[in-house]
Every structure is written in structure tokens, then in C-alpha cells.
Amino acid sequence: MYSVKEVMESMNLVVIGASRNPLKLGSLLLKGLEDTGFQGRIAGVNPRGGEVYGVRLYCSLEEIPFPVDLAVMLVPPKVVPAALAECARKGVKGVVISSEGFAETGEQGRQYQEEVRAILRSTGIRSFGPNTLGIVNTETGLATSYFANDDMLRPGTIGVAAQSGIFVGALLRYISSYNVLRMSKVLGLGNKVDVDESDALSYLMDDEQTRTVAMYLEDIRDGKRFVEVAKEAVKRKPVLLLKGGRTSAGARATASHTASLAVNDKILEGALHQAGVLRMRSIEELIATLIGFQCTPLPLGNRIALVTYSGAQAIMSIDAATEGGLRLADFGEETRNRLEGVIATPSKRENPVDIFPDMIAHGFEKTSSEILGALLEDEGVHGVFFISFATPEVEPYRPLVEVIRERPTKPVFFSLMGIREEVEMCRAFLEERGIPFCLFPETAVQVFCHMWRYAQTVNGSLTERWGQDDAE
Amino acid sequence: MYSVKEVMESMNLVVIGASRNPLKLGSLLLKGLEDTGFQGRIAGVNPRGGEVYGVRLYCSLEEIPFPVDLAVMLVPPKVVPAALAECARKGVKGVVISSEGFAETGEQGRQYQEEVRAILRSTGIRSFGPNTLGIVNTETGLATSYFANDDMLRPGTIGVAAQSGIFVGALLRYISSYNVLRMSKVLGLGNKVDVDESDALSYLMDDEQTRTVAMYLEDIRDGKRFVEVAKEAVKRKPVLLLKGGRTSAGARATASHTASLAVNDKILEGALHQAGVLRMRSIEELIATLIGFQCTPLPLGNRIALVTYSGAQAIMSIDAATEGGLRLADFGEETRNRLEGVIATPSKRENPVDIFPDMIAHGFEKTSSEILGALLEDEGVHGVFFISFATPEVEPYRPLVEVIRERPTKPVFFSLMGIREEVEMCRAFLEERGIPFCLFPETAVQVFCHMWRYAQTVNGSLTERWGQDDAE
């Protein structure tokens, strides 16, 4: 049996069901491969031969004059078993079965899928799918989906595995339009006839390019094995899990999506949580948390400081922090002295620190830089949330970026409220400089909670205080 | 005692503590009033007299040659009682005490606040604050805060009351940069020395310009009265409540913010929920829900349909819908026939309807328009969620806007995933046309849940199925 790694490193690719009709997936994919500049060899299989987007189409797999590592199948389900047998004869290591129409569509499709499974077992070929956009390897430029684009192929350190068809393509387009979010490897799992969530996590855990793992799953085939792999994986890198099908109606819908037998398995969820897997409740939370892990160091403790212009936003953040097991830091004496120098009202020097209205008198840049510097240098502070307002120019935020760059050991998150255009401009400015921005500070606090939980998992100090009530 | 309404309709305004120093709030406010073009009369009080931004400054209130309705106070707390007495002699109906330094800062401030309260009681003057940006009336162009801008003053139908200082200013800037979100009246409550959440809601309930009420509160002074007012209010318009201080740490922080005595009062929360008040869990949810109420009709039932390119996003939406008490619609025969005409695979014609890959063969516009039209004409469908991908141009979405305009009786929400720039462009296109857009469909589903709950409250059919498990 070939390994997932061998398949992911394929440099000789063939598209079975390549097409010259520009409206067919078999054509769109070849166009995509041309655009993304895969450096390996590519061929297509089409009974009528020919050429499309510079790729030669052969009448059959055996006619191809070079060895083939990976085959992408875009042919109808009933043809897939025969094509697989041909792949075996050609020495193909892995296939991406992009075709739909397998177990997710009913009995006939289920039979095709079982046939495929039997051939895979007997030949040792590994398979992604059916019903998946397939895989991405940013080290080699390989992408088996027409959804891939240049941004998605810029190498990074986020490994993604998703039990989904097209969703992963659209999601990756979105994620990779964040400057700071770059992938390492992507594994589309589809119906999981072979490569499943445990195989995928196991591969990403060992993959040196990958430093953070993000997964979307609709079911977990072998709970015991997945928990075991997850336990190992979280020792090496954070594992973020977004799961669909948590209600019975949602679970029923997964049946016609990726033919999942999703169960509302609270025990499994509990075990994964205990193992240190970070459960994401939404795509939004997933993206924000990825940004946190990519851009900031792990927190050394759970004592946070808030700088704010607005008690209300601070209070909503404190609620979220408390619910997530964080505490407000007590400031050290030096910090107190430094705050006294810029903030006139004693109660505003407490945590949350209120920069209003002193920043009007002393200037925003001076006041906020001095405060942020003092907090980042306070040993009792493990992370800072800077909650302020968007400004018509980004200049006021430039000195703060410097303050953070000079003290890069603690997470700092920005949340700015105000006119949308100004918010977007300030967001872009900060993101370009690798500083995490969340529109609402509660989201930033949630991200910190995940990072703090992960920090405890890694250093073995995790006790079950997650979700604990807010008693001190 | 004057009424809140009388104060909100003030046309003769004086700023006590007006300043010629451009860095002082007393100057910024007058500049703001000039920019926002309030049509009433404005004067300032400053012991040294003079003029700033075209506003004449008088040495004392009694020198002002016209009657004054409303005074905005930017003077230190210890001066406020004397200024109030002067206001009483001048016949002032209401004051906005913007000054900080009252009960939120400790014992001395608490004493000042009690003095203020006593004077208000004996004179009948109504007061907003202390510690608030004050009020906005978009009918008259009145705004007592330098945070106000043109967008915020464009008249609309959303009434806002917020127990906060500056937050409400930044929040309103953000909200009013959404084309579809326009305010009617805004009441900043600050420390609530006089006008409190019940007064504010009572006023907004009666205000004809206001069609939806949004509140941010840190404590509720008189729970019984507030529940009674809320019960009346929800009969006339939806009431959305975002509450800070739900944890004990958050509640402690409210003490130094608006001097609230917040308690984690689950009984009160339950009563408000029963009364039909819609509890928002985040600013994001508040904004999305406001957009829902502004842009779409109330749903007539809880059976929803999903159109999607992605099983995964549909499944996460179905999870959210199920948790919120919604059901997937069963399609009528005519709908089934129409879907059969555009979707080849039978399982993809079920709910959620999967437009992929048929939309490649038949064209996105044609496929999606036909499907959306069929669903909106199906009596068993009470709302549609269109979950798709962002496109490089907005053109593909133009026919869908027409389909919705021609069938305007049901809520339709869009969620598009893809490259961020394209997402933003499609979002802007849809929002400009009054069609609600939520990046993630789970958010749209939550909004629908709130609207469905409100619909049931209004027609008296509300039974406690909210939050119920997903048993059918």
C-alpha cells in the first residue's frame, strides 16, 4: 500500500476524463493546472486524443510514455472501477476521484463505491474522494482542482483536511486571500472511500511544512483511532476542528453530501476535547484562530490586559474572557507608575485601561504607545487586547506596530470600531504587518482562549478549566 | 416633569462648557454641530465669552436671548449642580450630562450624582447621563456628540438606546456605514441618573419614526417595569437587546464604566425572553438582525429552503437552523417539476438544493434564477438561503435580484464564499439593492430565527420552542 505522503508528492499527473469542451470540469481543471504552474508532468486521457491548454491527451493510460504517480478521475462512476484497474497496471500510486454519483446518491452509487474500495485494497492504490476537489501541495505547486488559484498555491504552513466537495475550494479561496494565511498541504476527503480523517491528520502531523492543522469533518469513521492520532498530533502542532452535522437534521443532510453516517457523538467530542483538539464553532472562528496561531506567540498564561476607549466593548470582552477561563491581569507597580504618567483618572488606570479622554489631551499615538509598551513589559500580563476606533488615516497605528515589533513575546490583538471604510483600511494596514485584527474583541478573546488552551496542552499543564464558570 | 419626547424634540440648544481650544470636547462638539447641520438655534456658555465655529458663547445661561430647551454639559462634576440650578431658572427641559467623573469613579462622584438627582427631581428637568455622548434625533438633525457624522444623521427607522459612553458613538458610526441601516432616534443613557432603559424603551415604542429598537444595556434598574414596557413594545416593533456584564468579572467592570449594579439575573433574562425581547449575543448578530428586519418581510413560518453549491455550508446552516427551531421545507409538486428541469441528479433536487455542477452546464444565471423563483413561489417555503460563491463580476447576481424584487413576500438571505475582494464586491452589490448578505450562512439562519420568533410573538402564536432540541 502506498503512503499518503507518496501520493501528496506526486510529480507525474494524469487527468482521466480530460476534455476539450471548455464548460466541462475536465477542461477547467487543465486550465487551472496551466494557470497555477505545476512543475511536474501532466497528461490527459480522452478516447479521442488531442491536446488542450498545452496538455497532450492520450487515448488510454498505457499510451502515456512516462510513469504516472497520480490520476485525477473526472469520469462517470460506472467507468471508475475499470479506470482504477488500468491505473494499477500503470503503477499509479494514488487517485483523486473527483466524480460525484457514488454513495452520496443512493444504492447504485454505493455499489460503485464498494467496487472501488475492493480494487484499492487489492492494488494498494490510495484514493481521495470520491466527490472531492482533491489535493493541493504548495511545495510542488500541485493542485487537482480548478478552484485553485495563485494565492492558494503560495507556500505556507497551514495544513487543511476537509471532508467536502467544493466547499474546501471556496473556503481556501477565502482563507488564502488573507495575507497572513498560507497553506502547506490540502487534502479533500469527499466520501472517504480510502484516505480518511485519521490518515489525513497522521500525514499532516508528520509533514514538516505544516505547523497548524485545520480540519472540516462531517463524520469520524474510526473514533478511537482518530483520538489516538489527535493526541500525538497536538503534541507537535495545534489541531483546529470544525464539524458539520451536529444536529440530527444536519447529520441527515451529510448522508446525501458525503455519504456520512454522522452521529451526534458527544462522547467522541469529549475525548477529542480532552486530547487537546480545538473545536471551532464557525468558519469565522476558524479563520480568526488560524490568524492568531500564525501571527502571535503562544501565551504563557491566562492573565490578559485590555486597552479600550469604550467600557462597553471591554465589558463584552471580559464576559467572553471569563467564560473562556481567562482572568484580568493585576498590574505591577512599574506599570501603575507608567500609566499614571498618561492617564489622569485613577479608575481608568485599572484593567481595562481606558484611554479616553486622555488620548485627546496627550495625543493618541503617545498615550497608546506608552500604555501598550508598559503592558507588554509587565510580567503579569500574558496578552493584550487593544480595543479602539478606526481612524481616517492609518498613521496613528504606526507607532503601535513598532511597540509590538520591539516586544514580540506576547499576543496582541486589535479590534477597531467606527466607519466601515476606515475600519477596513486600518484592518488591512495591521494585517499586512502580521498583527491580528478582529472586528469584535470578543472574537479575539476566543482566539486567545484557544491559544491558551493549546499552550497548556503542549506544556502538559492542561486541567479542565475550559468552560468553567467564572468563580475565581 | 418634562417628557423624554419633549427633550428629544429640542430645537434650542446650549453647550455649557463650550471651548475655543480645538482639543477640548467643548470645541469638538460645536464643530460637530456645524458639520451635521442642526437646524435649531445653538449657543455656548463660557465665562470668557467669544465665538467658535459660528456659535456665540455667552458668559452665563441667563444672558442667552432665546429660550433654551436642551443643555449639553461638558463641565467638571462639581460644577454640574450649580449649572443645573441655572438651567432650571432658564426653563431648560432637559440636559445631557456628557461629563465623566460621577458615580463610576467613586465616592465623591457618587455624591455629585446624588446632588444632580435631587435637583432633577425638584425641578422636573430630564437628564441623559452623566457619562454619555447624549442623543441623536435624525428628524431634526440634532446630535449632542462630536462622534456624529452625516451618515448617522440620515433619517431612518432604527431607534437605539445604549447604556454607554463612547461606545454608542463608534457603534453608530459602524452601523450607519451600512447603506440599509439608518437611525431614527438615539438615546445615550450613561450612568442613568434619570432617563433609564424603561424610559428610553417607552419613548422609542411610542415614537412613530422608529420601527425597530436596538438596545445595549449593562444593568436593568427596575426589572419589573422594564419587562412590562418590553411586553407593550414588542407588540408594536421588534426589540433587540445586547447585554454586557453577564459574567461576574464583566459585571464588576460595569461598576467603573457606567456605575452599574449589574447582576447575573437569569430570572429577568427569562422574563424578557418570554416577553418577546430578542437577545443578541454579539454586535455582529445585532447588526445582521437589524439588516434582516430592515430589508426583508417577516417570515410566515419556519420552513426554510437552502440553495447551495456546497453541502458543507448547507450542513452547518442546517445545524444552526435546527438548533433555532427551524425546519427544512418539503417541496411541492410544481417545485419538484421545475427543479427537475434544471438539476439532473435527483438527490440534488432535494432540500438543500445543490446547484453544482448543473449550473456549469446550463449557466449560473439561468439555473439559479429558475431555482430561486420556484422556491419563492412554493407555499411550503417560508424563507430561502442562497449559499454560493463570489464571482469576479456582480453580473451573475443581477437576475437573482430581479427574481427577489418580483416576489417580495419572503426573506431571502445571501452568503457567498470565495476570494475576499470578490466577496466584498458581491456583498456591496447586494446590500445596495437592499438584499441581506451574511458572510456565513449560519449567521443568516440565526437572523431568520430571531425574525420567526418575532413573527410568532406578534401574531400571538409563540410557544416555547425556541432552543428546543431537534426532535421533529
Image: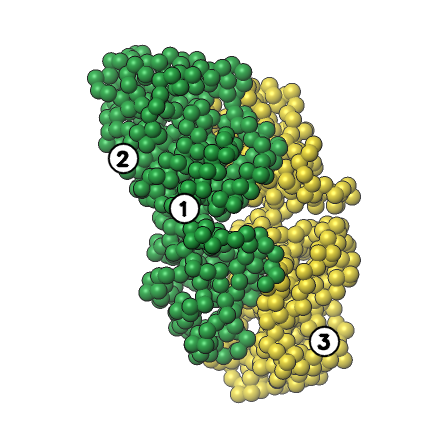
Chain colours: A green, B yellow
CB atoms of marks 3 and 1 within 8 Å: no
Residue A401 relative to residue A37: left or right: right
Few, some or many C-alpha atoms within 10 Å of disc 2 (few <14, some 14-19, many ≥20)? Answer: some
- Can residue A357 be seen in the rendering of this structure? no
Report which residue position mark 1 lands on.
A235
Q: Residue at x 38, y 56 (%)?
A: A297
The residue sitting at 45% across, 22% down in the picture is A100
Mark 2 / mark 1, whichever is N-terminal:
2
Q: Nearer the viewer, mark 2 or mark 1?
A: 1
The crowding category of the residue bearing disc 1, from other C-alpha atoms within 10 Å (few below 14, some 14 to 19, many at least 20), is some
The quadrant of the image that shows the N terminus of chain B is bottom right
Q: Position of residue B66 (x, y in %)?
A: 65, 79
* Residue A16: image location, x then y, percent: 33, 19
- Residue A140's tag is 2
Camera-near label (3 vs 2) is: 2
Q: Callout 3, which amino acid?
A: Ile
The chain under label 1 reads A
Q: Are marks 2 and 1 in contact (CB under 8 Å)?
A: no
Vertical order, B253 against A440 (above or below)? below
